[in-house]
Image (cartoon, helix red, strand yellow):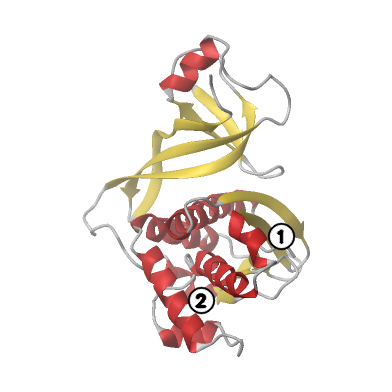
Amino acid sequence: MSDGELSLYFGLQEGQRADLEVVAAAALEWVASIRAAAREIEPSAQIRVELINAAESSLRLNAILDWLEAQLARIDEGSGKHWRLKKLAIALAIFVPTVGYPTYEFYLGDKSFTSEDRKTLHELLDTVKKNPEIGVHRQNFFKAIERDRSITSTGVSEGHHDRPVIEVPRDQFAERTGVWQILSEDEQERTTRTIVDVLLVAPTLVPTPRAWIFQLLEGLPEFSAIMKDKRFLSALEHNHVRERLRVGIRMTIRLEIKEKKVDGAWVLKHKGRSVIEVISPKVD
């Protein structure tokens, strides 16, 4: 198991498969939440995401947290434990609805966790809780998977072979969609921003804002977003993008998502998804 490995787990009804569109939507929110949590705890963190496996009774997606302390953890036992606490805080950010010692006692029955460890985890999650972006991703995550009756539970583990650190049963999905509400009940529109790693499926090679097509992970549904990064479009026009046209181009983009409330549910507005910044590939 990688020191920085986190695994998103979906329990499935026997003999059924999850809807890939639902999994893709939930995966986007999960990736966004761990990125947001990682930025609060360790701004230098780099996150890679990959599909691990699917079986008759479960589906897992994997994320690797890369930063220097992961290497130091192998050398120094003390830093290794602190690294693990940071990783757990990032992993639990979207799943733990409250912050308090009883919560950690319930989720972390591992007797190797000392009172000092729990205090540190409390402080880390308290830091994460102050970022309202994570609350939005939590709500969207559980709203997405609630649509698929084949998904019976969800959780997160430290490695793709490990048992979940926390597992949330389906009967709690609806409750989690309203945890840490950050918008008033009469709010009718909202805009969120998130950073995601994607595969480029189809660019639109004109220097104006037009729809490009991306894919979060191989095998998951594609989605479109209006390319609005003027600097990137200018660089593309003048051949200053450090990439050649080929299959399998990976990009890191900052997405802006505009939604409106319809019959009490948030739905994507027309042309409501746009790329406001291309982080990678770099431009000259």
| Rendering coords of residue 58 (x, y %) | 72, 66
Left or right: 3 with respect to 270?
right
Residue 129 occupies which quadrant of the picture? bottom left
| Picture residue at 40% right of the left edge, 46% below the top | 267
Left or right: 30 with respect to 249?
left
Taking 269 as reference, is 241 above or below it? above
| Rendering coords of residue 248 (x, y %) | 72, 31
Disc 2 to disc 1, how far (Cα)?
19 Å
| Picture residue at 58% right of the left edge, 29% below the top | 281
Of residues 160 and 22, the one nearer the viewer is 160
- Residue 269 visible (yes or no): yes
Residue pointed to by mark 1: 17
Residue 81 occupies which quadrant of the picture? bottom right
Taking 46 as reference, is 11 above or below it? below
Left or right: 146 with respect to 249?
left
Q: Quadrant location of the N terminus?
A: bottom right
Of residues 205 and 170, the one nearer the viewer is 205
Residue pointed to by mark 2: 171
Of residues 71 and 215, the one nearer the viewer is 71
Looking at this view, name the residue that lies furthest to the bottom. Answer: 111
On residue 244, which mark appears? Answer: none
Helix or strand or loop: what does disc 2 sit on? helix
